[in-house]
Amino acid sequence: MTPKTTLTAALAAALAVTTGFAALPVAAHQHKTAAAAMPSIVQVAVSTGVHNTLVAAVKAAGLVETLSGPGPFTVFAPTDTAFAKLPEGTVATLVKPQNKGMLTGILTYHVVAGKVTSADLIKLIQHHGGEATIETLGGGELTARLSGDKIVITDAAGGATAVTQADVMTSNGVVHVTDGVFLPG
């Protein structure tokens, strides 16, 4: 197998090397209640105070319902500071109604199907010779590597972005906060 893997293979490998609990359905009622009480990905993003641009973009793209749905999803969530690194006027242009398709493509490039924790990513990186390629919901690929003790994600445009806060658990997946915005190419 090459050092790269698709998301499907990545998730299978991650589940094979973990305890398997993530693949089990919630059986006890109290667990369903606890999961329902936990905020969704969108609720977490709204509550942080550092993802205002991301939340506005998700609303403009019409993705609130999807990212509030059952998932599970893994979201690499750029902060407001990360969006501010883009060329001036980029965000204002993307949130215009006529650019909804482009915006949706960029946002879904930050989302992976399934719940992939930082431990899963690290295991995949190590298992695949130092890098793991994961497929996004937008149909693109991201490459994960380790740089010291940080997970660094490289997008199709060659931009390297660090995960600055990993494993923010939600009712419908997990959020990894990033210091950059992924660009599909």
Image (tube, grey):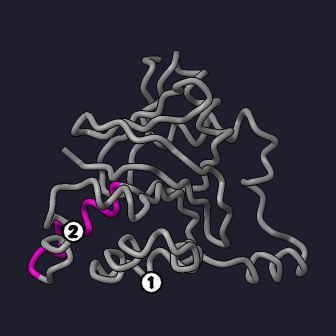
Q: Which residue is mark 2?
A: 91
In the displayed structure, would residue 111 be above or below residue 132?
below
In three-dimensional space, the C-alpha distance between marks 1 and 2, rounded to whole angstroms, equals 21 Å
Q: Amino acid at mark 2?
A: Val
Q: Which residue is mark 1?
A: 65
Count the marks.
2
In the displayed structure, would residue 119 be above or below residue 178?
above
Q: What SS does tag 1 mark? A: helix
Q: What SS does tag 2 mark? A: helix
The picture quadrant where one finds residue 82 is bottom left
Mark 1 or 2: in front is 2
Q: Is residue 154 left or right of residue 60?
A: right
Please tell me which residue lies in front, 85 or 132: 85
Q: Amino acid at mark 1?
A: Glu
In the displayed structure, would residue 66 be above or below residue 182?
below
Residue 60 in the image: state x and y as whole percent.
28, 82
Q: Earlier in the sequence, mark 1 or mark 2?
A: 1
Q: Mark 1, residues whose alpha carbon is within 10 Å: few (<14), some, or many (≥20)?
A: few
Residue 12 in the image: state x and y as whole percent.
60, 39
Residue 166 in the image: state x and y as whole percent.
62, 50
Q: Identify the magenta region.
A: 98-109
